[in-house]
Amino acid sequence: MNDTRQRLLDSACIVFSEKGFRLANVSDICKRADANIAAVNYHFGGKKKLYEEVLRYASARADERFPLLSDASEVPCPRERIARFVKAQFQRTFCTGLEGCFQKLLVHEMTTPTFAHESVFRDLIRREIRFLHGVVRELLPPDATDLHVRVCSHSVVSLCAFLQFNRARRERIMRRAQSSEDLAEEMARPATLFAWAGIDAVRQDLEQETNRVPDGAPE
């Protein structure tokens, strides 16, 4: 990849993830990348096209370093796939390098969606949603509805989301930690236990409902 293009891409990842698309300034991106402003139009065709490329690039960097998805052939146990998903979420949240940029971009897109929300962003997170829905469905009874699956999946993500959206709290916690990796491990373990317990509780409730004898019916 062209060196200037790469510097612009890395710089834009940082600036967009910190400020969001609307507040990010092309001149700040170019200054950080040691490039002239015309280089953005030359290499990307403008700020909007650069932002779309940043979303894809940041997602790929995060996936490579902290993969959320585990293949069932390599990790047969669905509970372990849930554990890896949760841990990767916290690793991304506490990462201060480029691999952590997508999680910050995600927060911006969820709170103040941009023009790229439908065209790029939703496609990038759709596979993660499908993955989590599939794993949760494995842990629920066969008669679980799509609503049960969605609610359980949302609950798993919510265990990780508070610190993603609360920057001040996240930074206070990070200042007290020895390393981001240790912190991710520390946070992921109890969150995973909550996720497992919650899904187990829903499964047990559904199984009891299935086996419950209706009032007035012969036992």
Image (cartoon, rainbow, N blue to C red):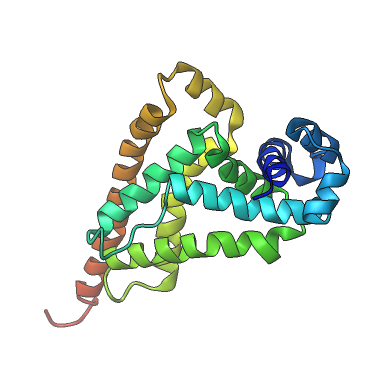
Quarter occupied by the C terminus: bottom left
Residue 91 image point, x, y percent: 44, 38
Instruction: Please report the residue visible at 39 percent of the width from the left and 28 percent of the height from the top.
Output: 183
Q: Is residue 163 above or below residue 112?
A: above
Residue 173 image point, x, y percent: 48, 23
Q: Of residues 97 and 125, which is closer to you in this image?
A: 97
Total tally of numbered discs in the picture: 0
Instruction: Please report the residue visible at 80 percent of the width from the left and 31 percent of the height from the top.
Output: 31
| Residue 89 location, quadrant | top left
Instruction: Please report the residue visible at 47 percent of the width from the left and 55 percent of the height from the top.
Output: 154
Residue 197 image point, x, y percent: 28, 49
Give the residue furthest to the right. 38
Give the residue furthest to the bottom. 218
Q: Of residues 42 and 205, which is closer to you in this image?
A: 42
Give the residue furthest to the front. 2
* Residue 174 relative to residue 136: left or right: right
Q: Is residue 85 above or below residue 139?
A: above
Residue 214 seen in this snapshot: yes
Residue 214 image point, x, y percent: 24, 77
| Residue 15 location, quadrant | top right
Q: Is residue 66 above or below residue 186?
A: below
Residue 159 seen in this snapshot: no
* Residue 33 relative to residue 197: left or right: right
